[in-house]
Amino acid sequence: MDREELIFSEYKTYCEQKEKFIDRNFKTNKFYMIAAVVLIFAMIYTGNVVFLNKISATLVFALFGVSVCALWWMNVDSYNTLIKIKYSTVIEKLEEKLPVKPFTEEYKGIADFREKRVFMFSDIQKIFASIVALFFFAVCVSELTPILVVLFNKLNCLIRG
């Protein structure tokens, strides 16, 4: 195998791995979406279950939901960063040694597209993760408010005592 064939073989292998990486990104997002839906159903199903001192299962699941959404957001950012590195650094450097540079041109097209402030799929994922996180946060607030009111009243009674 001569040098050009070796470079092309490495390029082809790397491009295939990048595509697998993007597929894994979609599977990961699917996991977070399913996890959020499962937590919502768990909150609905266990609505009247109470642990310890008035800590409801709904509050516990909502806290998990906020955590899942935060992880989801970070995961979207991580995958986007890694995909950009794969495009702009590794593949473009390999393409410098090839006669045609399809991914370099594609990446330039994506960059031009992004400058027009058009929503990309990752932006939609982040918005969805944020909306779901706000839902879980609102549930947390609604579940914590009565507990905090009781604690405040007890503290107030102790102070006036």
Image (cartoon, helix red, strand yellow):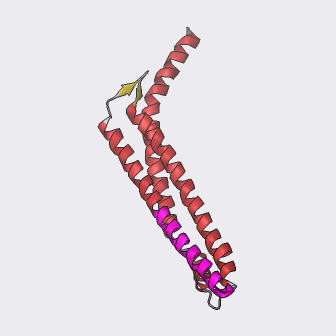
Q: Quadrant of residue 51?
A: top left
Identified at 41% across, 49% down, the residue is 35
Identified at 44% across, 60% down, the residue is 27
Above or below, 55 against 33 in this view is above
- Secondary structure character of the magenta stretch overall: helix
Decide if residue 119 is in sight here: no
Return the residue nearer the eye: 52 or 154: 52
Identified at 44% across, 35% down, the residue is 60
Above or below, 121 against 60 in this view is below
In the image, farthest residue toward the top: 161
Decide if residue 17 is in sight here: yes
Q: Is residue 128 left or right of residue 45?
A: right
* Highlighted magenta segment, given as a residue range: 1-26
Q: Quadrant of residue 9?
A: bottom right
Return the residue nearer the eye: 147 or 161: 147
Identified at 53% across, 66% down, the residue is 21
Q: Quadrant of the C terminus?
A: top right
Q: Is residue 88 left or right of residue 54?
A: right
Above or below, 111 against 149 in this view is below
Q: Is residue 132 left or right of residue 14?
A: left
Q: Position of residue 44 (x, y in %)?
A: 32, 40
Q: Position of residue 1 (x, y in %)?
A: 63, 85
